[in-house]
């Protein structure tokens, strides 16, 4: 464990003191959810956010970020140049290729699982599985770190287009648990029942608050705080339901993002990030292509490419990318060997993750695989390093700990650290 | 000279094989009987002398992706190859062979090609959702035919040479005249497509397309009854459609529902369909009589089949296999 106040990421810009973190956590533990940790105050003040695109099922690195054309494992696709000289990606990503100067690549993902559930848990939690403790996932950690005291919206939103999630908040508490938007629709139960007027609802809320105050005056616990918070958040959501209405975005933007489900979800993500939601996860499903990998990657990445590239471009042109870390990941990659059904199977030994935006060195490539992509030959890293890197990039000292229930809970795997070469 | 053994699909047996280093993706048999061509995942195209089995690479580089479709001209003097690089290449098969012309035919994958019965026109189709016509002599563009709403997987000329049919990922068929003008929508091979709601992807399409010799029926090969798109859990099938009105006449399926995809189908001049399949259930040659949904004979192959071609005399069938071999099978009894 590094010493207090040590810059875990090698940059003063990324430094948050562990003392402040522990102090804040202690305050939170003593004062319930209303007591915001210093960690959150410091990072929230910087306005940092994270956009996580999760390509469920395991996107093929060879058909995306680490193409190997002309080899026995390369498949039928060619590599194309990007906006960064010397970096090539698969021809399935022509729009993303033009945004590469905003992005960076980790081509040395190694040592991962070949199992869907385990791989997802590892990527979401940044911990080798199984872990003895139920640790919070990235979305909850980012929300905990970045959510301002008076922020009225959820800090951790999953726009689900298939796939699992959201990640667990674990001991951090329900405030940081993910809120699900199924198919970019507002969270469930956030519309007022037709027979309930706004005035009646206001009076109901006031009555509940009075009763709640009387009760918590005598029996205040973390549970009652969580209960109170849930009610208040629900009321805030009712008042701000329009934030979740992607239909309010201009028609021309719907056209730019494309009229697909994923296009709508990316536009929704932009809307949430613009409204300051600290952690937005968008799932795109599915890439588990044991059969006809190439046909399905034409289909799936054809759906992914333009909306994602448009979102990156919009974040950049609107001045949000400097404060928004972008990551595109899966639970694992796919086998370099092409099976007899034109498929690729699960592969955790040599694959890729894309990171970009806030705190990331744009246009960087860290890690390298061999000629046929079967092993990492330079700078092997894994889910733990990526987890550290994401947090460091938005200014969180990933070597710090949460103080929960009277004990320290390391924010990230203490045995690992950030990919410093990728940090700006 | 003794009469050759009569055609007997039930006696089908391997007659020759040629090993290539990489998995094959397609094959074709020269209508003049001299050559068999095959292509492979290394982006190469080859010709074998059908009699001796000696192979030679056609000079490259012409493709830089998998040459997915191969067809000879009717007189056997040219071979056309189409690839996932979108290119259409015409090979002159003299000595030495040489690329006569090359065009970038499609934006994205070229998935299917067919040569008109008179050899003058080559039809191609691809992921840009178009069918295109090319002059066989020099590769001049003749027509672009939009209209499909998904990737166009296969194309076939009607035996009369006056029209052609294309079929897309979702099984929709369209008919075009020889100049590329739309004639009609020709129904749908609906059994060969599904949208997998779990995986949120389309699965299916015409992996092969062939007319019966009299042009009255059209065979569309692919995969049906899919329960898990990404694992290929479904079985090979051939949807037979009446050309007159596009209605499904019959769905040919294996009696034992081995998993896989039908990658090739052909009408044998003696009046039966031959198909090849590959997938989780292995590679199979199957033979179907008219009017019967189940095969009357099936032969297990040593690897997944990926394409087939009949010899012009109808006595043999060539199969491109995933294990990198091109094998020929005689449809007659072995002689001692």
Image (cartoon, coloured by chain):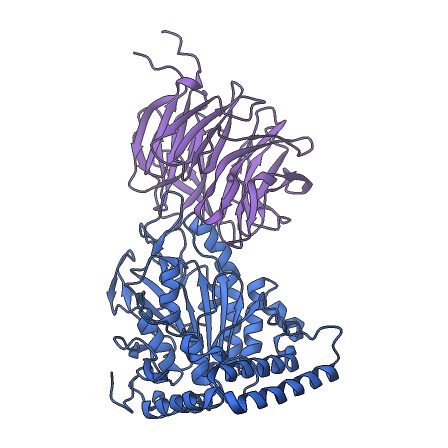
Chain colours: A blue, B purple
Q: Depth check: A333 or B217 in front?
A: A333
Please identify the quadrant where the C terminus of chain A is shown: bottom left
Which residue is at 27% across, 90% downward?
A: A4
Query: In the figure, residue A246 lies in which quadrant?
Result: bottom right
Which residue is at 51% across, 84% downward?
A: A225
Q: Depth check: B11 or A390 in front?
A: A390
Please identify the quadrant where the N terminus of chain A is shown: bottom left
Which residue is at 32% across, 70% downward?
A: A127
Against B267, residue A102 (above or below) is below
**Residue A310 appears left or right of A423:** right
Q: Depth check: B264 or A24 in front?
A: A24
Query: In the figure, residue B241 lies in which quadrant?
Result: top right
Q: Depth check: B67 or A9 in front?
A: A9
Against B333, residue A73 (above or below) is below
- Residue B150 location, x and y as percent? 58, 50
Q: How many marks?
A: 0
| Extreme residue in the top direction | B2
**Residue A323 appears left or right of A209:** left
- Residue B46 location, x and y as percent? 35, 37
Against A148, residue B308 (above or below) is above
| Extreme residue in the front direction | A218
- Residue A215 location, x and y as percent? 56, 87
| Residue A283 shows up from this direction | yes
| Residue B30 shows up from this direction | no
Query: In the figure, residue B178 lies in which quadrant?
Result: top right
- Residue B180 location, x and y as percent? 63, 42
Which residue is at 38% across, 85% downward?
A: A395
């Amino acid at each position: 464990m590094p010493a207090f106040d040590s810059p875990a990421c090698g940059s003063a810009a990324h430094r948050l003191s562990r003392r402040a973190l522990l102090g804040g956590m202690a305050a939170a533990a003593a004062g319930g959810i209303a007591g915001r940790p210093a960690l959150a105050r410091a990072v929230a003040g910087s306005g940092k956010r994270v956009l996580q695109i999760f390509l469920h099922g395991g996107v093929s690195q060879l058909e995306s970020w680490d193409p190997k054309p002309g080899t026995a494992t390369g498949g039928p696709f060619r590599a194309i140049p990007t906006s960064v000289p010397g970096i090539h990606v698969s021809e399935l990503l022509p729009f993303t290729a033009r945004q590469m100067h905003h992005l960076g690549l980790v081509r040395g993902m190694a040592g991962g699982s070949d199992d869907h559930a385990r791989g997802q848990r590892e990527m979401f939690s940044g911990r080798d599985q199984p872990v003895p403790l139920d640790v919070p996932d990235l979305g909850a950690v980012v929300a905990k770190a970045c959510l301002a005291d008076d922020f009225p919206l959820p800090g951790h939103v999953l726009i689900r287009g298939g796939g699992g999630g959201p990640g667990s908040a674990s001991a951090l508490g329900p405030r940081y648990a993910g809120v699900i938007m199924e198919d970019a629709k507002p969270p469930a139960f956030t519309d007022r029942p037709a027979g309930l007027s706004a005035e009646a609802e206001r009076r109901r809320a006031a009555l509940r608050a009075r009763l709640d105050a009387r009760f918590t005056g005598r029996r205040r616990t973390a549970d009652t705080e969580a209960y109170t918070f849930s009610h208040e958040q629900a009321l805030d959501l009712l008042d701000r339901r329009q934030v979740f209405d992607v239909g309010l975005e201009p028609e021309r933007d719907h056209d730019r993002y494309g009229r697909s489900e994923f296009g709508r979800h990316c536009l929704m993500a932009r809307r949430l990030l613009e409204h300051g939601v600290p952690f937005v996860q968008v799932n795109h499903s599915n890439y588990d292509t044991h059969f006809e990998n190439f046909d399905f990657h034409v289909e799936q990445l054809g759906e992914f490419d333009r909306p994602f590239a448009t979102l990156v471009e919009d974040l950049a042109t609107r001045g949000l990318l400097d404060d928004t870390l972008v990551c595109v990941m899966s639970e694992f990659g796919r086998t370099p060997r092409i099976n007899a059904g034109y498929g690729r199977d699960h592969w955790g030994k040599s694959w890729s993750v894309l990171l970009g935006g806030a705190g990331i060195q744009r246009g960087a490539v860290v890690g390298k695989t061999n000629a046929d992509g079967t092993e990492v030959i330079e700078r092997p890293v894994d889910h733990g390093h990526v987890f550290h890197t994401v947090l460091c990039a938005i200014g969180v000292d990933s070597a710090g700990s949460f103080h929960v229930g009277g004990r320290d809970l390391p924010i990230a795997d203490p045995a690992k650290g950030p990919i410093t070469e990728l940090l700006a | 000279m003794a009469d050759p053994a009569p055609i007997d699909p039930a006696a089908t047996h391997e007659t020759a094989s040629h090993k290539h280093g990489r998995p094959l993706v397609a094959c074709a048999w020269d209508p003049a009987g001299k050559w068999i061509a095959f292509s492979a995942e290394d982006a190469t195209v080859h010709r074998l002398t059908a009699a001796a089995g000696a192979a030679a690479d056609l000079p490259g580089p012409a493709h830089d992706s998998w040459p997915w479709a191969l067809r000879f001209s009717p007189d056997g003097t040219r071979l056309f190859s189409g690839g996932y690089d979108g290119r259409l290449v015409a090979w002159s098969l003299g000595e030495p062979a040489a690329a006569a012309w090359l065009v970038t035919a499609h934006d994205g994958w070229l998935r299917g090609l067919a040569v008109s019965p008179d050899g003058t026109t080559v039809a191609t189709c691809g992921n840009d959702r178009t069918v295109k016509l090319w002059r066989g002599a020099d590769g001049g563009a003749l027509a672009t035919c939009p209209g499909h709403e998904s990737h166009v997987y296969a194309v076939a000329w009607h035996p009369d040479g006056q029209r052609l049919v294309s079929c897309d990922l979702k099984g929709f068929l369209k008919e075009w005249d020889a100049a590329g003008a739309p004639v009609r929508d020709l129904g749908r091979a609906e059994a060969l497509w599904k949208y997998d709601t779990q995986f949120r992807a389309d699965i299916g399409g015409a992996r092969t397309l062939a007319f019966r010799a009299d042009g009255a029926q059209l065979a569309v090969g692919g995969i049906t009854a899919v329960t898990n798109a990404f694992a290929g859990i479904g079985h090979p099938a051939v949807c037979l459609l009446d050309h007159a009105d596009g209605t499904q006449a019959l769905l040919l399926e294996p009696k034992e529902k081995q998993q896989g995809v039908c990658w090739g189908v052909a009408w044998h001049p003696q009046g039966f369909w031959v198909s090849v399949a590959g997938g989780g259930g292995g590679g199979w040659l199957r033979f179907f009589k008219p009017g019967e949904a189940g095969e009357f004979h099936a032969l297990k192959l040593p690897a997944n089949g990926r394409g087939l071609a009949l010899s012009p005399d109808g006595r043999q069938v060539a199969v491109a296999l995933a294990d990198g071999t091109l094998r020929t099978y005689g449809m007659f009894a072995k002689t001692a």
